[in-house]
Amino acid sequence: MIDQIETVMKENEIKMLKDCRVTVRYNKEEIKQLNRLFKATTCSKLSEYIRKISLHKPVTIHYRNKTADEFLSEMILLKNELHGIANNFNQAVHKMHTMDTISELKSWAILNESLKNNFLKKTDEIKEKLNTIHQLWSQK
C-alpha cells in the first residue's frame, strides 16, 4: 500500500494536481485591470497568471516597440496600395499589347499617365517613410 502511495506521489510531482481552491472577488474595474495585465503576458489562462503572481513566480510580459508597430501598419497600407497600383499597371500593359494602331497607343499613353504619376508618388512616399524610420532607429 505504501509503495502505491509513493508511486502516485511521484506521478503527482510530475503533474501537480490542483485540488485546492481559493476564491477571490474583484469589482469591475479591478477585473478590467487584471485582464489588461494578463493579456500583456505569455500566460495562456488567467488562472495561470494569477497563480504565478500570487506565488511570486516570474511572468513573461510582451513588450511592444511602438515605433516598429506604427512603421509596420504604415508599410502594410502602402504595400496594399502598391499592390493595387501594380495590378492596374499590369492590366493597362496587357491592354496596350492588344492595340493595333498608333492612335490607340497614343490615347492609351495619355490615359495611363495618371497611373504612372500615382505609382511614382507612392514610391516616393515609401522612400520618405523608410528614411524617417532609418533616422529614428540609427539615433538609438
Image (cartoon, grey):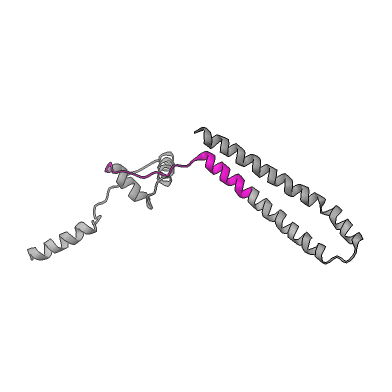
**Extreme right residue here?**
103
- 90 displayed left or right of 56: right
- Quadrant (top left/top right/bottom left/bottom right) for the N terminus: bottom left
- 5 displayed left or right of 112: left
Q: Residue at x 28, y 41 (%)?
A: 56
Vertical placement of residue 121 versus 89, above or below: above
Q: Is residue 74 magenta?
A: yes
Seen from the viewer's position, the closer of residues 52 and 104 is 104
Seen from the viewer's position, the closer of residues 23 and 50 is 50
Across and down, in percent, residue 65 comes to: 49, 40
Across and down, in percent, residue 94 comes to: 77, 64
Q: Residue at x 73, y 49 (%)?
A: 119
- 16 displayed left or right of 71: left
**Extreme left residue here?**
2
Seen from the viewer's position, the closer of residues 37 and 127 is 127
Q: Which residues are magenta?
A: 55-77
Across and down, in percent, residue 106 comes to: 88, 56
**Extreme front residue here?**
102
Vertical placement of residue 19 versus 121, above or below: below
Seen from the viewer's position, the closer of residues 68 and 101 is 101
Determine the image quadrant of residue 7: bottom left
Q: Residue at x 77, y 47 (%)?
A: 117
